[in-house]
Image: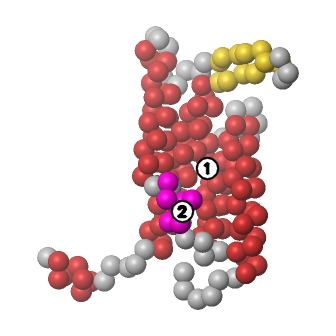
Amino acid sequence: MIGRRSVILTEADRWLFPVVLLVSVYITFRGHNAPGGGFIGGLIAGAAFIIRYLAGTPLTDRWHRALNPTTYIGAGLVIAVVTALVPLAYGDTLLESAIWKWNVPAIGEVKLVSSSIFDLGVYFLVIGVVLLSLMSLGADPVHDEEVGEES
């Protein structure tokens, strides 16, 4: 980023980033029975990274080194495709939903639906696309002269 960093935005980023990520995870897993899901959860998480980018925090510092966008895109695609195709192996239709239930003593009945796993794949995919967009926005532009010299 060019120019001075805003102290207010930098401090707001420090507090907002984890809160917005938690909200995105909540929206992602709440989406099966209410509005939300992997796409909107991923967009909310992407908004957290956009805030971080606007605050001038580099997306390549120590904490963000693990944030390779292509890894997120690949993992999201694999999770979503596998979740969609697994029912075919059991003779069901594509994207057929399965429900697993457990009784946890202190909590009660806990239910996991396979569509939640699909939503998680979409969540990672959207985060990867947003990160890739941000990193390409922050990259140095390629000049025509440099391209001509390489040819």
**Label 2, residues with CA under 10 Å away: few <14, some 14-19, many ≥20:** few
The answer for how far apart the CA atoms under marks 1 and 2 are is 22 Å
Q: In this view, does 43 lie to the left or right of 148?
A: right
Q: For residue 15, what is the image quadrant?
A: bottom right
- x, y percentage for residue 140? 40, 78
Screen quadrant of the N terminus = bottom right
Indicate which label's residue lies in the foreground, 1 or 2. 2
Amino acid tagged 2: Arg
Q: Residue furthest left?
A: 151
Count up the numbered dots: 2
Between 123 and 35, the one nearer to me in the picture: 123
Work out whether 85 lies above or below 76. Answer: above
* Residue drawn where x is 33% and y is 79% of the image: 142
Screen quadrant of the C terminus = bottom left
Q: Is residue 19 left or right of residue 73?
A: right
Between 34 and 73, the one nearer to me in the picture: 73
- x, y percentage for residue 90? 47, 11
Q: Is mark 2 on a helix, strand or loop?
A: loop
- What stretch of residues is rendered in magenta? 60-66
Q: What element carries label 1?
A: helix
Residue marked by disc 1: 42
Amino acid tagged 1: Gly
* Residue drawn where x is 70% and y is 75% of the image: 10
Q: Please check the rendered image and state whether residue 74 is part of the magenta-colored stretch, yes or no.
A: no
* Residue drawn where x is 76% and y is 78% of the image: 8
Residue marked by disc 2: 62
